[in-house]
Amino acid sequence: MVSIKYSCFSFLLLLSTFIYGDENRTKLAGLKDALYGFEYLQDSTRTKVWWFHGETVTTRAGITADLEAFHKQGVGGVVYYDQTHGNCEGAFEAFSPEWWEMLVFASQEAKRLGLTFETHISNGYVAGGPWITPALGMQRLTSVETIVDGGKDLEFSLPVPEARSDYYKDVAILAFPYQREIHDDSRVLKPVITCNKADIDAKACFSSSKQLSVIPVQKPGESVYMTLDFGKQFTARCITYSMAPRGKAATDAMNVPGPPTEEFVGTGFRVLPNLGELEVSDDGLTFKKVCDLKPVYLALGGWKQKTLSFPAVTGRYFRLNLHDWYEKKDRKPHLELGQVVLSSRACIDQWEEKAALTSAYIENDFTPSYQKNEIIDPDRIVDLTEQTDSLGTVRWKVPAGKWVVVRFAHVPTGGRTKHGRKNMIGLECDKLSAVAAEAHWNHYLKHIADSIEAYGGHLDGVVVDSHEAGSQNWTSGFENDFLRLRGYDLRKYLPTLAGYVVESREVSDGFLYDMRRTIADLTVEKYFGTFQRLCKERNLI
């Protein structure tokens, strides 16, 4: 049928010249060329296939049989990819002599049959392995605080940041005046904690333990009340808690540098019920709502912490009114909750998401317009970085009053590769670092490309699969890249990455947007850009 239509076009093209002139003849000629492409297919248009290895033994006979079958059916090429699931019985260890033999032979057979041959950027996904050290792995910013009394010369040691593999690298040591509106919290005042359910340990939910407490499912409309009695009036401005993330599937892998939205969608996403409400009372009998307690959505990387801020509210009693947090078809309807902190600290609403510590589309911002005594004045921040030695000892002539000293450092997120051969599993490389991306290339892709070339095979390109190791918000030298890309120094705004409000709600939120924008830019430039450059140098796609 295509041949008949194509022949008819030759006649129509001739006829149109006499009737309509050269303009329509040009248009018809273009359509003729398009039809030619359907009749005579170019190899570049043919389908490629993922060709998985590593779940069982790979043999020369199997390789030849697969590739000849692909070729017979019109497939244009393959992506040789070690992606493993299950026991992988009989599979060769990666980089073993048998593994190299099969890989090189596969490239030779693809070349013989005229198929394109590509390989994956990593063993499993997405880009990492045992050669990625904690220093080259994905990083996030963390902080620890120390409060000191001023009016004298001091020498004091800062706490060591909590870090995986005991690796951390200092970014800055900053100090700012202590303000009661920022730092008093429920742990300092030690309220009496009670619960209306005898089988639930409410105190454990408010402890610093990372072990979350299991709250059994309740009947529809039935509440679990966890009440805090401060014994006197207490002013709260935010609540932080950790919970086992919920939802059908993780929504995205890296933080999206967009403004807040009403709702978001993603793979398997659905709007989940709230956990209940935070409530306040003066007499312990009549309570009124302070804010809804939002769920923590499942995100790649497994982040569990959420902070909600609200206008200052005062009362002797506060309680968590937990109810109807599950869905009817929930396979695990119980609630796992812990590390709850009700605080008088003025805080940025949902700061963990805004600071890109977790991957989520950011919902509407409910940060109040705080008063000056509730926020940090950037002009009063003192940079103590140069007065702190490598062991974290600060020597400082402290001005009068109480001061908060914050140690900012970057630590590994712990993100690891998935579904590779066992001896190839390791840390994911830093997605914001060209040094880390090139280190991964040199330990994996370069060896493959060199070996295939040396033994007469052919490698056409490199493929990158999905990133599923969660987000990151820092890398070594991030502050320099931020200055280059955004045009201003981020140092005095670092406290916002611990939830503080600096200068104003609008300024803090704007800085956090610039953070997310910079993370996106560096992912393109340092990660994908580095792989693109290295591929181009070897004439690879």
Image (spheres, helix red, strand yellow):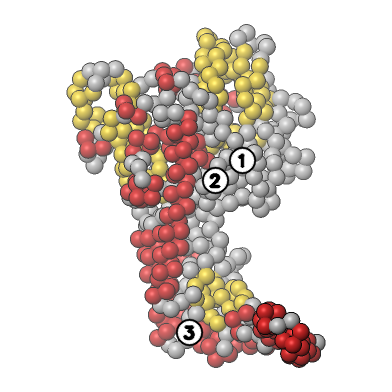
**Amino acid at circle 3:** His
Q: CA distance from mark 1 to mark 2?
A: 9 Å
Q: CA distance from mark 2 to mark 3?
A: 42 Å
Q: Can you give x and y, in whole percent of width and height, for residue 379 in the image?
A: 32, 28
Q: Which mark is residue 261?
A: 1
Q: CA distance from mark 1 to mark 3?
A: 48 Å
Q: Which mark is residue 458?
A: 3
User: Is residue 3 visible in this depiction of the protein?
Assistant: no
Picture residue at 55% right of the left edge, 17% below the top: 313
Label 3 Cα neighbours within 10 Å, binned few <14 / some 14-19 / many ≥20: many
- Quadrant in which residue 159 is drawn: top left
**Amino acid at circle 1:** Thr
Residue bearing the label numbered 2: 258
Picture residue at 50% right of the left edge, 49% below the top: 471
Q: Secondary structure at mark 3?
A: loop
Q: Is residue 357 above or below residue 321?
A: below
User: Is residue 110 visible in this depiction of the protein?
Assistant: yes
Quadrant of image for the N terminus: bottom right
Picture residue at 63% right of the left edge, 30% below the top: 293
Label 1 Cα neighbours within 10 Å, binned few <14 / some 14-19 / many ≥20: few
Q: Are marks 1 and 2 in contact (CB under 8 Å)?
A: yes
Q: Are marks 2 and 3 in contact (CB under 8 Å)?
A: no
Marks counted in the figure total 3
